[in-house]
Every structure is written in C-alpha cells, then in structure tokens.
Amino acid sequence: MRRGDTAAIVVALSLSVAASLGLAYATQSQKTIQEGVFTEGQVEQGEKVWEEICSQCHPMDIFGPDYMIGWEGATAGELFELLQATMPYESPGILADNEYLEVMVFLFSLNGVKHGQEELPADAPQLYGITIAGPFEWSGGGR
C-alpha cells in the first residue's frame, strides 16, 4: 500500500467517525425546555441568585416572552454560555456554573415553562442537547 493510499484511508475513517458523532449529537438534540428538564428547587435557587445579583441591573419583565422568542430554536447550552460570558456585566463569569444554570431556568419558569422531577446539570455539552422552544407566557407577575 502506498503512503497516499494510507492517508486516504485515515481521512475516510476520520470522516466516518466524525459523521457518526454528529449523528449521535443530533439525536440528543431532540429534547426541548418544555419537557420538564429542570426542578422546582433549581427555579427557587435561581430566583435567589436573581434577587441578590441580577436584579441590581435588570428589571425582571425585560426577560418576558419577547426575549424568549428571540432565543427560540437555540439551545439551552448557547444561552447558558452567553450568561457565563457576559453576566454580571461588571464581572462576567464570577458566578458558579450551577448559579448561571439556576438563573436560566428561573427565566424559563417566568415564561411559563414547567419544571419536572429531574435536576438539570450545569453541563454545557448536555445543555446543547436541549432546544429552547415555546409557547411562552409571562408568569412573572409584579416581582
């Protein structure tokens, strides 16, 4: 076998493995936030973080349905990583991963997304398998 043939086989095998991994990832992306992917406890913790930190700069009602509709079709992982990279404004990344996650699910909850029984881990790769999808309905009241 010539050196060129070996390289072609290695490239073909690499592409095959990459395609298989891509298919596995796409299969994982079937869940949406509407499937009870976080717990009530996570929402409660997120509200505490919100009140202590986020509310210093943000009025709660700016994160209503219009905000969520802007994220529709994106993944929870994308929103999670954006929060980590940009918030709080003066010190991005200062919160623990679970605090960013809890704030995110609190925002979901404010928009009528129901909690479930299984805790959502603060694991970006796993969050990329969960799509943000409506319907969204503001339930934040006057908080």
Image: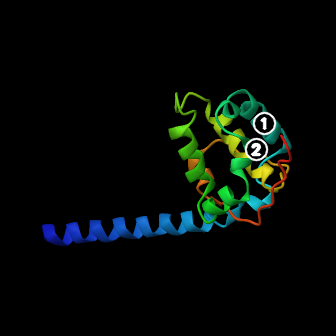
| Left or right of 108 on screen, residue 90 | left
> Pointer 2: what residue?
106
Quick check: 10 above or below 94? Answer: below
* In this rendering, position of residue 143 left or right of residue 131: right
Picture layout, residue 90 above or below residue 80: above
Could you say which is closer to the camera, residue 32 or residue 27?
32
Picture residue at 56% right of the left edge, 67% below the top: 26
Position of residue 109 measured from the top left corner of the image (x, y, whole percent): 79, 50
Residue behind mark 1: 47
Q: Nearer the viewer, residue 123 or 104?
A: 104
Give yes or no for contact between labels 2 and 1 (Cβ–Cβ under 8 Å). Answer: yes
Where in the figure is residue 78, as x and y percent of width and height?
55, 52
x then y, percent, for residue 11: 28, 67
**Can see residue 1?**
no
SS for dot 2: helix
Colour scheme: rainbow
Tell me which amino acid carries mark 1: Glu
Other-residue count near label 2 (Cα within 10 Å), few / some / many at <14 / 14–19 / ≥20:
many
Residue at 55% in and 65% down: 24
Which residue type does callout 2 highlight? Phe
Image quarter (top left, top right, bottom left or bottom right) of the N terminus: bottom left
Left or right of residue 87, residue 51 in this image: right
Res 38 label: none
Q: Secondary structure at mark 1?
A: helix
Q: Is residue 102 toward the left or the right of residue 39 in the image?
A: left
Q: Earlier in the sequence, mark 2 or mark 1?
A: 1
> Height in image: 15 above or below 89?
below
With respect to residue 63, does 4 lie above or below? below
Check the picture and name the quadrant holding the C terminus: top right
